[in-house]
Amino acid sequence: FKLTPDAEQKALDLFKLLTLARDESFGNARTARNLFGMTISKQANRIVNLPNISEQVLATIDEADIPTVDELRSSGVRMPPGLDASRP
């Protein structure tokens, strides 16, 4: 997969927030795996109705594909305390 510059920045910002708010229960690998799974699901939902789906489209992650804090939280991903839901 290749992230667009905006998607890369959103993912970086999200991981910075997660890292800043971590506590002893924070599991980075599990969180990263869950974030990746949600990203691929959102990407699939975004491209399913596109008229032309090329290999490039299939391999590209857009900013809209990166989940927000609220989406992660509502999907059951354990979020460290203190995260501001209005960010990424």
Image (cartoon, rainbow, N blue to C red):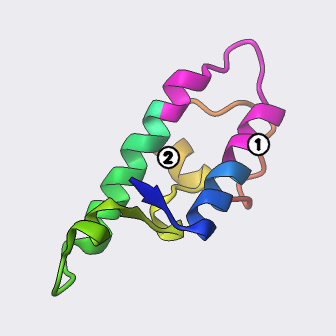
The residue positioned 30% from the left and 69% from the top of the image is 56
Query: Which mark is first along the chain, 1 or 2?
Result: 1
Residue 17 in the image, given as x and y percentages of width and height: 77, 43
In the displayed structure, does residue 27 sit left or right of residue 53?
Answer: right
User: Which residue appears at 68% of the width and 60% of the height?
Assistant: 9
Find residue 14 and report its horizontal and vertical position in percent. Answer: 68, 49
Q: Which residue is mark 1?
A: 16
Tag 1 secondary structure: helix
Mark 2 near mark 1, Cβ–Cβ under 8 Å?
no
Q: Which residue is mark 2?
A: 74
What span is in magenta? 14-32
Q: Position of residue 58 (x, y in %)?
A: 26, 64
Using a 10 Å C-alpha cutoff, classify the residue at mark 2 as few (fewer than 14 neighbours), some (14 to 19) or many (20 or more). few
**What secondary structure predominates along the stretch shown in magenta?**
helix
Element marked by disc 2: helix
Rendered position, 60 above or below 82: below
Where is residue 45, by image quadrant?
Answer: bottom left
Q: Amino acid at mark 1?
A: Lys
> What's the CA distance linking mark 2 and mark 1?
20 Å
- Going 72% across and 37% down the picture, which residue do you hit? 18
Looking at the picture, how far across and down is residue 87, in whole percent?
Answer: 73, 59
Q: Is residue 67 left or right of residue 61?
A: right
Was residue 19 drawn as part of the magenta stretch in this picture? yes
Tag 2: amino acid: Ser
Task: Reply above or below: 74 against 86.
Answer: above
Judge depth for marks 2 and 1 and give the one in front.
1
